[in-house]
Amino acid sequence: MNNRKTIFVLSLFFLNSILFGQNGISNLASEINKLKNDDALKHASWSVCVRNVKTGAIISENNSVQSLVPASVMKIVSTTPALSILGQNFKFKTKIEYDGFIDSLGILHGNLYITGGGDPTLGSSRWKNTKINIVFEKWTKVLKDKGIKKITGAIIADASIFDDALIPGTWTWEDMGNYYGAGASGLSIHENYYKIIFKPSTKIGGNAKVLRTEPKMQDIQFINHVKTAKAGSGDNVIIYGSPYSKLRFLEGTVPTGKKEFTVKGSITDPAYTCVYLFNKYLTKNGINSSKHPTSVRKLKIAGLYKNHKRKTLLIYKSPSLATIIKQTNLRSINSYAEACVKILANKKYEKGSTENGIRAIRNFWSQRGIELEGMLMKDGSGLSRVNRITTGQISKMLCVFTNDKTYQYFYKSLSVAGSSGSLRNLFKGTYAENNLRAKSGYMKNIRAYAGYVTNKNNEQLAFAIIVNNYNSSAFQMKKKLEKLMILIAEME
């Protein structure tokens, strides 16, 4: 009798577990069906795919083979191969070199070179040791320790580890002049952006004057059409301009009620800007050069470049790749992602171009069993609206990468629900809080999320959600997708 009771109780337990688990899946399926009839998605293309990480099996999906624009979720596709191939301890290397000779009076009879290694963090304020003044101080100390007091030649930027195309060809005119449109240079500085400080008018509709740039940009000309809007309206300025061009067209508005208002734009020529700023720093510290700073690119254009034999004074190293990729994904820094693509290209094919980097990334995923039909990759950051990928592909990549030796570093680079990055204000008080980790993607009329969550059965799930061309506010769509991800977390 006792055995029968035990069997009966266990049977009820397992039956209840199965039904409850099915209910968790049906809740998600019900919400997906509800979204199919949502007016905000009436004209949209959207997709969901949820997989069990251990088995790779799809648990729930909708349009998971449809190719869509992923926005910054594309960073998952690019940063994972960089971590795996280069290793979490990889560091970019910038060299301080010179040609000619140094005489007994401390005069360098030749040129000083800043030879870039593709480091996107040079001059960044995200780490103490990468700040511009700290970096320049280290470089200057090396010159002084060597006894250099004067340079008869020029300070020359060499960014040739990467090609001269600072940005991928499919980035738009509307994006490329703004800070998030800063691409990857072989020699970068200050994350390849600068600040424009405006003086707003005291009246709405009045002209907003450009006061200065920080750092001071050399040879840049603003055509300024920026007006002043109501207080609290925020930054609505678009900076139009292409790489290496001196012209920048400023359109849009800044808010009234502030003495100064700051907007960020992409540096036109990062390599030249780096040596220009360093030359100024050296002059302040008593080391003068006889010629104006320049770059290998400028000298080649002018037909003046000579490949002199160089000697190395210093090899400056970046923070580790693991910490760089954490910032790339957590803060969604486009220039960092593009640098990862190009350094992969340099590693694999000895030519640091976006095209070669994408080739390396596609090979990486193909070798790990990912079917790439339907995936179109034009950059590493996701800023290109030509990019296409399926949620089925992204979720499978996430599953596969859990077996990589660098997986833990990638996992830690993702935003934590209710705690950090783009997810810090989401999922509060839900099962997803401090559990779900994801990379988000956002551009006009595009919302995307992809990452991991552990469900109530202690199973790790990988998920991807992409919505293109929705008909609602960005905030409303974010809340709809938040609800969907909470249901994914609550699955049993």
Image: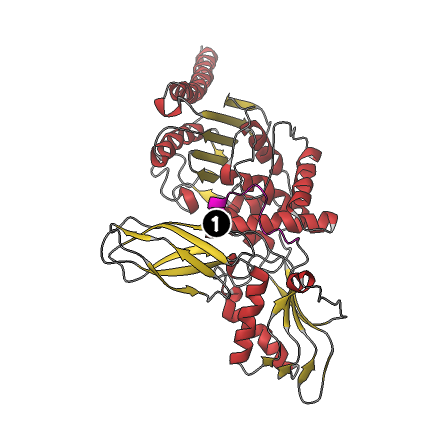
Q: Which residue is depicted at the point 70% across and 77% down?
A: 110
Q: Main secondary structure of the magenta part?
A: loop
Extreme residue in the right direction? 309
Residue 43 higher or lower than 306, as above or below = above
Q: Nearer the viewer, residue 435 or 319?
A: 319
Extreme residue in the left direction? 203
The 10 Å Cα crowd at callout 1, few under 14, some 14 to 19, many 20 or more, is many
Q: Which residue is depicted at the point 48% across and 30% down?
A: 465
Specify the amino acid type for callout 1.
Answer: Tyr
The verdict on residue 244 being magenta is: no
Q: Which residue is depicted at the point 54% across and 29% down?
A: 391
Visible residue check, residue 292:
yes
Q: Nearer the viewer, residue 483 or 258?
A: 258
Q: Nearer the viewer, residue 437 or 479?
A: 479
For residue 136, side relative to residue 368 (left or right) = left
Extreme residue in the bottom direction? 105
Quadrant placement of the N terminus:
top left
For residue 309, side relative to residue 191 (left or right) = right
* Number of marks in picture: 1
For residue 186, side relative to residue 436 (left or right) = right
Q: Nearer the viewer, residue 172 or 92?
A: 172
Visible residue check, residue 492:
no
Residue 62, how many percent across, how many down? 49, 21
Q: Which residues are magenta?
A: 163-177
Residue 157, how many percent across, how many down? 63, 65
Residue 265 higher or lower than 141, as above or below = above
Residue 81, how many percent across, how many down? 64, 43
Circle 1 residue: 180
